[in-house]
Amino acid sequence: GSRFGDASRRGRRSAMVLRLGDAEGASVDVESTWRDTARARQTRGKCQTEPLRYVEAAVQAVDRAEVGVQARLVDGRDEFAEAKEPESGESPRDDVDGADRDDGEAKSPGADDGELEAFVSKAGPLVLRELRRSDASHAFTALALAAKSGAELDQGLFGSDPAAAAGGRREEASVLHTLMRPQGDLEEAENLSCTAVAWNATGSQLLAGYGRFDNYGWCAHRGSVCIWNVFARSAHAPALEEFTAPDVRLETSSGVMCVAAHPVRPSVLAVGTFNGEVLLFDTTLADVGEDSMVDASQVEDFCHREPVRELVWVPLAVVSRDGKAGASGRGSAPGSASEYVLASTSGDGRVLVWDAFGVGLQAPIRGLNLAPRRSKAFGGTALAFWGGAGATGEAFVVGSEGGALTRGTIQAAAARDDAAAPPPGRGWTASAQRVLAFAPAKERAQLRRNGDKFLSTEDVQEISARQLYEASRADRFCFAEPTRFAFRPHIGPVSAVACSPFRRNAFLSCGADGAVSLYSTLDRDPVLTVSPAKGGQLLHSCAWSPHRPAVFACAASSGEVFVFDLSASLSAPVLSLQSANGPVPALPDQPPVFHLAFNHRTRGLLASGDEAGNVRIFKLGWRLGNRQPVDKAALDLAYRGAATA
């Protein structure tokens, strides 16, 4: 039974295979129609233009002119009388219209005198007014400069010869005074150099600081500040000679690195020393038998610990919240000395703000760390605040020992809220509250805890700014980092920076690479770079003229002072002082010039101090000392030329 069952199953499988076998059938082809559809959209056509027509034409014009002349009678005769054969003793005369008439016949007028007089009376004042406005306007001066070629653009406004700027005459300068280093005092004994010069608020006194830049380590010698009354020589008093003793002499415990005269009070000056001290002097105190030194900072962790390289007086409204009160909440009269605070920078990488007439110099009211945390050191060597038209004065530019140039703001580090400030009457003095208010926001709570702990453990009634710094013992709790913008650096240390007093965004910098660069605060790269010194000489100082927007000066280690006038040349100085072939006699061996200062009250006065301790006062020519109509256009051209280069 199983055998038949297997056979039947095999039969059924075979049948299934036969039913599913391959079979051939008719095929159907479907052609594509998309190509025909695309061809249907295409059309063929021909286009024929109109036949061209050629026309030849000629025209002949005839020049016609009519001239009328209205003559006036001179001594009863027509001024333009008929030309006729001269009689004996007479000269022939030409008649304009060629008409024959007698000598006494007057030429009929060609216009109505009444209408002409009315027109002149109406249009004359308008024409004269527009002529006067056009003569005084310089609206198109920049367009005339921009029309020059690229080569002429580099030469400036007056072509390749800067002497053309003076109307074909070379710029001139003379030595008004030469003050040699004081003899028989510590300046000569210590072989001190003139490291800084400045003019007081009235421009009548010249301040010269004496120190040395070649110290390595702690300064073992003293320094001084010598003051001369340049314009106090009457007819009965002797003239200012080379070895005239200074009228005022102030001694310091270490070498003087910088001097800053107060902008309002002529007798007040601030001094920065090599040991990191900031000193405040008032020369009027010596007249009443008191010490001229008003205050001095200490070499502490929260103060400067490196040489103070720059001091700048800043309006108090910049660092005050309301601009009406000082750091200690005091009111101040307009134009008073208390309306200014003192900003300083040194090699320790800080910018400190001091309220010299309020809190004093025992502790700064604010500090800024130039170098971010966990980064390379940033030693400050130069500092300047914006002072041009429209500037608020809160922004500054600082140069470093490594050549870096950065921009920062004092206001950016200020606290924007008063929530963390302790209420008055809890033992916090006004100076301590101010330090707390401007501390970094994320460190303010810790700083407050440090102050409260000091009040409880030291058994004192109140805490001052100095005690608050001592309680923290870390500048990261007190000093913020300003908002910064880096410019293209110098190759080597930056020697000086100077902001333009006329243009808000313009500033100068010079350094050990021998180049003086003109920058815009809105651009990283310099607008203009010039290397006036030959042979790789260093540049130690630069200064803007306070009277001419297009004039600035820089001092070189070769002993030369270069004066630039951008309206005369964008690439070369118009004047070189203290050079052997220049208009000013050279000093023996040409010591390097360390510092320059323009007199902001008397036009054309420029003071310089050199390594040998000599101070020279130059009187520049009239054109370099007085503002010219093309100054603004020349400065604009320098920036426009850089933008299109």
Image (cartoon, rainbow, N blue to C red):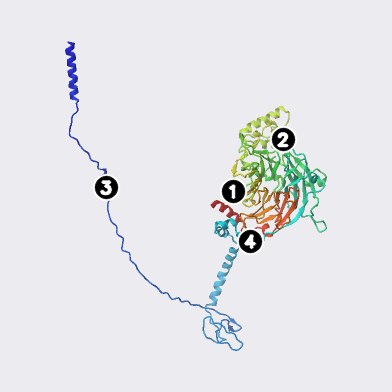
Mark whose residue sits in front, 2 or 3: 3
Counting residues from the start of the chain, the first of labels 2 and 4 encountered is: 4
Quick check: marks 2 and 3 in contact, CB under 8 Å?
no
Residue projecting furthest to the bottom = 88
Residue on which the image places disc 1: 526
Q: Disc 4 marks which amino acid?
A: Ala
- x then y, percent, for residue 248: 79, 48
Quick check: marks 2 and 4 in contact, CB under 8 Å?
no
Relative placement, left or right, of 406 versus 13 is right
Residue in view at x 18 percent, y 19 percent: 12
Distance between mark 2 and mark 3 Cα atoms: 93 Å
Q: Quadrant of residue 433?
A: top right
Residue on which the image places disc 2: 300
Q: Disc 1 marks which amino acid?
A: Pro
Residue on which the image places disc 3: 39
Q: Is residue 199 in view?
A: no
Relative placement, left or right, of 415 versus 332 is left
Distance between mark 2 and mark 4 Cα atoms: 56 Å
* Nearer-the-camera pick, 269 or 35: 35
Residue on which the image places disc 4: 164
- x then y, percent, for residue 469: 69, 33
Distance between mark 4 and mark 1 Cα atoms: 27 Å
Counting residues from the start of the chain, the first of labels 3 and 4 encountered is: 3
Circle 3 SS class? helix
Q: Residues within 10 Å of mark 2 (few under 14, many from 20)?
A: some
- x then y, percent, for residue 208: 75, 48
